[in-house]
Image: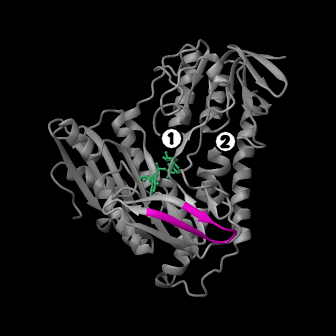
Amino acid sequence: MSSYDVIVIGSGPGGYVSAIRCAQLGLKTAIVEGRETLGGTCLNVGCIPSKALLHASHMLHEAEHNFGAMGLKGKSPSVDWKQMLQYKSDTIETNTKGVEFLMKKNKIDWLKGWGSIPATGQVKVGDEVHETKNIIIATGSDVATLPGVEIDEKVVVSSTGALELGKIPKRLAVIGAGVIGLELGSVYLRLGSEVTVIEYLDAITPGMDAEVQKTFQRTLKKQGFKFIMGAAVQSVSANKTKATVSYKLRKNDAEETLETDTVLVATGRKPYTDGLGLDALGVEMSERGQIKTNAHYATNVEGIYAIGDCIDGPMLAHKAEDEGMACAEGLAGQQPHVNYNVIPGVIYTHPEVSNVGATEQALKDQGVDYKVGKFSFMGNGRAKANFAGEGFVKILADKATDRILGAHIIGPMAGDLIHEICVAMEFGAAAEDLARTCHAHPTYSEAVREAALACGDGPIHS
Ligand code: NAI
């Protein structure tokens, strides 16, 4: 039996980052992981593999749609699906191996197997019980299933099965117009599938800025996405090769069906805490199955902490990472802080979509007097050259103080552009601070500056 200062359960971005920070701060640390590779959902069956497929399929889209106009003539590439999946697997391997290297480098023991907590100060992995002063639960989340829908990961798939379909389906039905549905839907649309998204609400990507939602949906429709909106999926019946999705339209209760080859269920995720033994320990949980924690990520049971998807807040890898670092720093006696007002969100479609801070709707609901600075990528030279003029940057600032309250971007590299606004918000910057910062020309980031200028005396290029 070995003993530790900290044992982290789960090696996703929350867990492994937390373990590294603990080790850097001098705590004797172990990480528990039952998968054969480290990295959790994100690296093995989530963020990373989906980005590989998005990248490959985007290259195909560029070849088919934009190469000719740039004077690059020739036959468009054909798709070798097996090789594309191999590229995806290789990408996973280099990333998971990278985390393994980081564990070794930081002298963190990998306790291989599924962990449970038989008592405070103990973590059981396989037949071995390890003593530890502190436990950080970073067990993440799992696919939330839908009543009446059985996932077989072949014809009816979750995001996991969608990353390794036997072949590219002729028709793909996606249940849920959230992040997963639109990212993976984009992959298969570009690879030639006919993609129909069935969404319960009247707008896609719930919680996002309404103007972005509209532009985003219009853009996706132009790309070939079909949408059935305001439709609650009731059930899916499937045989070995086909499926029928039954849904009810909310406006008139009409019951309709959609025949398809593959169904992707993308209706959300739920916290994953199975098998840890939290009930027996008396760890308090929320009604939604999340572990309840205080501002220091402590549960109600001494020495047990939790971070990431299994606690409250957006289910995002980078939110989990920040919490993991903060939890570790707290255990080492520091005074960390995660600013939940400045957690960016990104959808890696094309164009990308990103946001940080408040939406207009939220500001209206809070009665905040705000102003809007908006700039279209059509006015950005670099975007025009790269066939990327679709979309805009929108900055929301306090009307009286000019302080930036939120930002919403749809356009090229939106997921990268959002970060200068995040930094500005962390420093409590005014829109004018961004507007007066020199931005290199020609870059997409000039559109951010122009949106900031639009909060003041006006943008130059519109
Ligand atoms: P989501 O919560 O983003 O979207 C689910 C959608 O399904 C909602 O629009 C909802 O109205 C709809 N829905 C629910 N029940 C339905 C029904 N019976 N019929 C029709 N529509 C229905 O969930 P998603 O896309 O599965 O993502 C899960 C989590 O993973 C999210 O928290 C997301 O933030 C995270 N994620 C983040 C990514 C990123 O940051 N790029 C990528 C992938 C996932």
Q: Choose the circle earlier in sequence order: 1 or 2.
A: 2
> Mark 1 to mark 2: distance in Å?
13 Å
Name the spot of residue 28 as percent of width and height, x first: 72, 19
The kind of residue tagged 2 is Gly
Look at the image and tell me in which quarter the N terminus lies: top right
Nearest the eye: 419 or 37: 37
**90 over 101 or under it: above or below:** below
Q: Secondary structure at mark 1?
A: loop
For the point 54% across and 19% down, the residue is 299
The kind of residue tagged 1 is Met
Can you see residue 390? no
**Residue that carries the numbered disc 1 in the rendered image:** 315
Instruction: Answer with left or right where residue 240 lies relative to residue 416.
Output: right
Q: Which range is magenta?
A: 236-247
Can you see residue 9? yes
**Dominant secondary structure of the residues highlighted in magenta in the image:** strand
Nearest the eye: 159 or 449: 159
Residue 40: mark = 2
Name the spot of residue 323 as percent of width and height, x first: 52, 29
**398 over 109 or under it: above or below:** below
For the point 29% across and 45% down, the residue is 359
For the point 18% across and 35% down, the residue is 401
Q: Secondary structure at mark 2?
A: helix
| Mark 1 lies within 8 Å of ligand 1 (Cβ measured) | yes
